[in-house]
Amino acid sequence: MSNKNEKCCKMTKIGGQALIEGIMMKGVSKAAMAVRMKDGGIDVEEWDLKPNRWYNKTPFIRGSINFVTSMAEGYKYMMRSAEKSGMLDEDGEEEPTKFEKWLDEKLGDKLTGVIMVIAMIIGIAFAVFMFAFVPSLIYDLIETVVESDISVWQSTFEGILRMVLFVAYMAVVARMKDIRRTYEYHGAEHKTIACYEAGEELTVENVKKHTRFHPRCGTSFIILSLLVSILVYTIIPIQPAEWWNIDNTLLATLARVAIKLLLLPVVVGIAYELIRIAGRHNNIFTRIMSAPGLWMQRLTTCEPDNSQIEIAIAAMKPVLPKEGEDDRW
């Protein structure tokens, strides 16, 4: 919980991401990644950010584009942090298999990139199956055994089931040791940003007393997207079975999932604008809007230790605004 004396002086554009034994922060013109090395030291990597592109000034369009680029960058820096921290070398003493030797011979330095792409594809496929296909299939199966017309509840039913599956999945994942450690870094990231927004010096003691929950978190964005999807799919009824006289339940489900994926940019675009409003203002409307995501962060963030806060501070300091830069929303 937030300290009672905590006062938020401003809402900053600075955001971050928890990595493997590290944290990545993005400011106005610079980004940085701090990783805890095997020897206990801190490796800090900095890079300049590209100037604002046209889509960043285009409401609703920018949401989908930023979502895709953020996912790609997230995987990239996650893999890089794993390399820097030595996580990928834990089994380095074992003799590589023939298949591993063949991959290394054929791909060389490109191997990490290939693994990253494959992991991203598998992750997206799992998300589509679990959170899009399964709820639609369950609804279709229920509809086949119910005599009355329940199509008016379709979007609500699927949306609620999708949220239940997501929360259950995150609760199970949070029990894994390695994931929990990443969630501790996630908490350190939030607490450090909150400390900066409160106008306090970035020290371990100052950061520790701040909240680990933040309205602009990616977790809040996902929850908000799930809620927005219920509204969008209710306003735009998706009934391919009726449109094209599809009798097969599985084909009807696949068709509806495909249409929902086509509408996903609309959902993401709306959710992105809402999360920007939540990050820019603090009033009764934004507090209500942020509440589900903040509650969900009880699963996706944990209280960090001092060493993890040190990493967050190390990643934060290089991206602080330079003289003349405005990092406020």
Image (spheres, grey):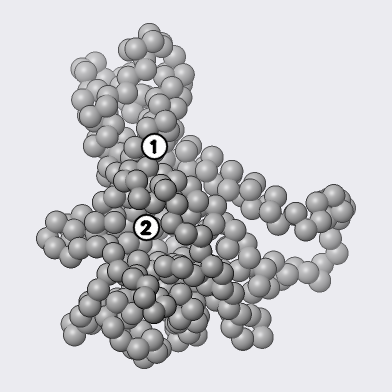
Question: x%, y% of residue 309?
Answer: 44, 82
Q: Which residue is mark 1?
A: 264
Mark 2 or 1 closer to N-term?
Answer: 2
Q: Is residue 294 left or right of residue 170?
A: left
Question: Which amino acid type is shown beneath numbered disc 2?
Answer: Thr
Q: Image quarter for residue 6?
A: bottom left
**Tag 1's secondary structure?**
helix
Q: From the viewer's perspective, is 239 left or right of 32?
A: left
Q: Kindly give the residue lying farthest to the front in the view shown.
A: 324
Q: Amino acid at mark 1?
A: Leu
Mark drawn on residue 219 = 2
Residue at left offset 29%, top offset 50%? 273
Q: Quadrant of the N terminus?
A: bottom left
Residue 185 visible to the viewer = no
Q: Nearer the viewer, residue 1 or 117?
A: 117
Give the CA separation, mark 2 to mark 1: 17 Å
Q: Residue at 50% of width from left, 51% of height from top?
A: 69
Q: Indicate the quadrant where residue 125 lies.
A: top right
